[in-house]
Amino acid sequence: MSKGMVIGASIGNCVHVAGAAHFLSLAEDEGFETLFLGPAVSVDTVLSSVEERKPAMVTLGYRLTPENGVTIVRELIEKSAKLTCKPLWIFGGTEPVADKVRELGFFDVIFDGTDDIDDSITFLRTGKLPDKGGAELFATDLTGRLAQKSPYPLLRHHFGLPSYEETIDGIEEIALSRVLDVISLGIDQNTQQFFFRPGERRGDLDGAGGVPVHDDEGFERLKAASQCGNYPLMRCYSGTADVIRFAEVLNRTIANAWCAVPLCWYNELDGRGDRPLRESMQEAQQLMAFHGKLSIPVELNEPHHWGLRDAHDTISAAASYISAYNAKKSGVRDYISQYMFNVPNSLSFSMDLAKVLAQIELTESLADRDFRVYRQARAGLPFLSGDSAVAKGQLAASTALSMNIKPHIIHVVGYSEAIHAATPEVVIESCKIVRGVVRSCLHGNAEAINDPCVTARRDEIISEAKYLLDFIVDKYSGESGDPLADAAVLSDCIARGIIDAPHIVKNEKFRGTLQTRMKDGKCLAWDGKSKSFIDEQTRLKRLVGSEAKGERREVI
């Protein structure tokens, strides 16, 4: 059923119609009938159409000299007094024109070029602009917010400064800017590890990596600071100890928008905790199950951890499937699959896209009505330059690349990350850069996913990853009823080098002997003895062979 008609045109001597035409396109998507009158339409023609069609809204654009625009609008005001219908009047123009027209007090809504697509969508759905409404305009949970913003992706950004009070002020500033949908609270290592054991806090970890929070009230104050502007959702790192208790704190204090947890990390493997690998995996599975029972979405930020440590593309793709598989087995219903582009940072854009497309196909093969998968894209941390101007360009380029996968969420990485933690100003500017790219790519982007080189590499990675997954299942089928969801199996795979990465520190527990090299923009497994690239079948065959000979340290 139609919501009514929207008439659009550019008026007077203005021939710039893109804004009006785009607004009408959005209106059609939202269930309105539309009528486009064209460029340089006279006031009399507009009013004649309004009188005849009785529209719900009229959107008019003018982008030339402000003084001329004012003259035309005054004519509109005078002549519209005779109309027998009262539509909602909308104006769009450059900021100088909009400022002058706003003074006349005729238009109900004015767009001045600083607005974005999602502002128009919100208006068409609610009758209000985001800056004119309160909390009632904004969903308080992730899936609700996704539905409100669709097809515009949600933007998420990490934020947390070593100073608690500066973090409070920064959250409010970010919320008031209305450019960010999810504040991903960055807490320091002491909070992650010793929240329930304050006596064990270490001075050298206070403020390390984020904001120090000491108690429930500390989280509640951070959440309260976000309740303005566009009322962004808030989420937070999972703890690296006492993970269930910490999850309970986050849920009751900040209404944690979703849980993000690694399956293999934040333990003895990477030094971000002292838990044994197998134990931390079991706790991660319990944490997923905890959130699944509460219908809280879960993200496993697993695959890019392997890519950041220079594992070859096959392992990153296999890790995507293992992550989603564990989430599904743990009872998660809404799963956020994060795809970090640019890791390793020497991947070419085309081969990077191919790897992510392989990850998507493997992950979404598990999707059904009880397991919904949402795509989250982000730029890779090592990709950004220490030169801020260069980093801004790289952030924009990576975002344009990631728009090929039609993400539901974009995890914005502040352009300053290679230099310092993001300040509120950096968060806001980085989000504006990304919003500009999204605006340009959301409709009618070139389909790089259909490039033959991309699809060929995607299929190659899928084949190799499936071989690795089948190898694990076959090898451990006699020891486990479900090897890919068994913490004992997965931790053993890492210990034995079946799942490995060059940057894993070698010790009595972990191999860290995998070698990789770049070739034609791909990250491939490398045989250090023969000085040649090897496929997954060869890699695993040689690994098994070296184990049989007792050569645990053999480089493959």
Image: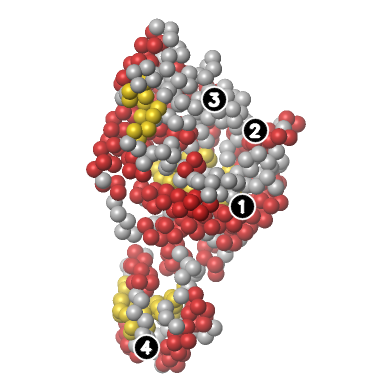
Residue 80's x, y, as percent? 42, 89
Q: Earlier in the sequence, mark 4 or mark 3?
A: 4
Residue behind mark 2? 193
Whether residue 101 is situated above or below residue 216 in the rendered picture: below
Q: Secondary structure at mark 2?
A: helix
Residue behind mark 1? 423
Q: Earlier in the sequence, mark 1 or mark 3?
A: 3
Q: Are marks 2 and 1 in contact (CB under 8 Å)?
A: no
As measured in the structure, the alpha-carbon distance from the residue carrying label 4 to the one carrying label 3 is: 70 Å
Residue 474's x, y, as percent? 34, 18
Q: Is residue 502 visible?
A: yes
Residue behind mark 3? 269
As measured in the structure, the alpha-carbon distance from the residue carrying label 4 to the one carrying label 1 is: 48 Å
Dividing the picture into quadrants, the one containing residue 376 is top left
The C terminus, quarter of image: top left
**Mark 1 neighbour class, 10 Å CA radius: few under 14, some 14 to 19, many 20 or more:** some
Residue behind mark 4? 43
Q: Describe residue 35's horizontal placement relative to residue 337 as left or right.
A: left
Q: Residue at x 31, y 19 (%)?
A: 538
Residue 441's disc number: none
Protein image colouring: secondary structure
Q: Residue at x 29, y 46 (%)?
A: 449
Q: Earlier in the sequence, mark 2 or mark 4?
A: 4
Mark 4 is on which residue type? Val
The residue lying furthest to the left in this view is 452
User: Which is more foreground, mark 1 or mark 3?
Assistant: 1
Q: Secondary structure at mark 4?
A: helix
As measured in the structure, the alpha-carbon distance from the residue carrying label 2 to the one carrying label 3 is: 15 Å
Q: Earlier in the sequence, mark 2 or mark 1?
A: 2
Whether residue 330 is situated above or below residue 553 in the rendered picture: below
As measured in the structure, the alpha-carbon distance from the residue carrying label 2 to the one carrying label 1 is: 24 Å
